[in-house]
Amino acid sequence: MALLNGLASALESYRTRDRLIRTLGYSCQLVGGVLVEQGPTRSEVGRRLLVVSAQLSHCRTVLRLFDDLAMFVYTKQYGLGTEEKDIFIRWSSVLSNMADQLYYPCEHVAWAADAKVLQVDSARWWTLSTALWLLSLLLGAVKSLWTVLKLRQKLRSPTGTFISQLPKSKRKAMEAKMSSEVLTLLSNLADVANAVHWLPRGVLWAGRFPPWLVGLMGTTSSLLSMYQAARAGRQAEADSL
């Protein structure tokens, strides 16, 4: 009962619910894509799962209509990142925030065009929003890789002087940070694969992924994100004790 109450409480959070919908959507696409390719006896179930996946994706698109303000507040608070000590992380974050901020209105226009609310070419706006998402993902991956390399350099100092002077708790925090950044890097790279797939044909592997592979990349990214969120929640509880 405690587990059920905890799950119900977690689902009250928009971010947690979004992660769950994303994971379910991509999982349905993965399983549905596999079943469709296995033959006519299982293809009907597979097609139904693909329809569920598409509807869950559409649900997330509609919910993102209300994300602009939250993103604007975050972008405004970060500003030019003057408090960030690492200049590379600072400007990468600024560019990433700009890409994320522009992504939402572009996706809204594409959604409105598909819904016949606006008389514009939705394909162009979907391409633009996907390109902005891809840019944000690449910047996120580069930031994570940069952070991992910097932390690894500190933790594996040839002289060992820096490491020996660090408290044990500090070393563990650095190792945990490096592990988190590795997971973020892998998650972003999985999403990058899908983002390129959704670009117009002719761009790298755009349009070449079968549904099950899109589902696999998305499920991998979603599970990594959920794991990180759960681990961060446990760490926050431990720190509050």
Image (cartoon, helix red, strand yellow):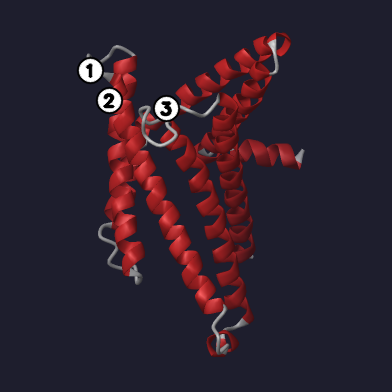
Where residue 60 appears, as percent x and y from the top left, is 46, 28
On screen, residue 138 above or below 104? below
Circle 2 or circle 1, nearest the eye: 2
Examine the rendered structure and indicate whether residue 140 appears above or below residue 145: above
Q: Residue at x 54, y 83 (%)?
A: 157
Q: Amino acid at mark 3?
A: Thr
Residue under label 2: 124
Count of numbered badges drawn on the protein: 3
Q: Is residue 76 visible?
A: yes
State the image coordinates of residue 221 (x, y, percent, origin top left). 56, 42
Residue mark closest to the camera, 1 vs 3: 1
Residue 74 or 116: which is nearer the viewer?
116
Of the pair 23 and 4, the residue shown nearer to us: 23
Q: Earlier along the polypeptide chain: callout 3 or callout 2? A: 3
Q: Which residue is mark 3?
A: 61
User: Which quarter of the figure has residue 205?
Assistant: top left
Quarter containing the N terminus: top right
Residue at label 1?
120
Callout 3 secondary element: helix
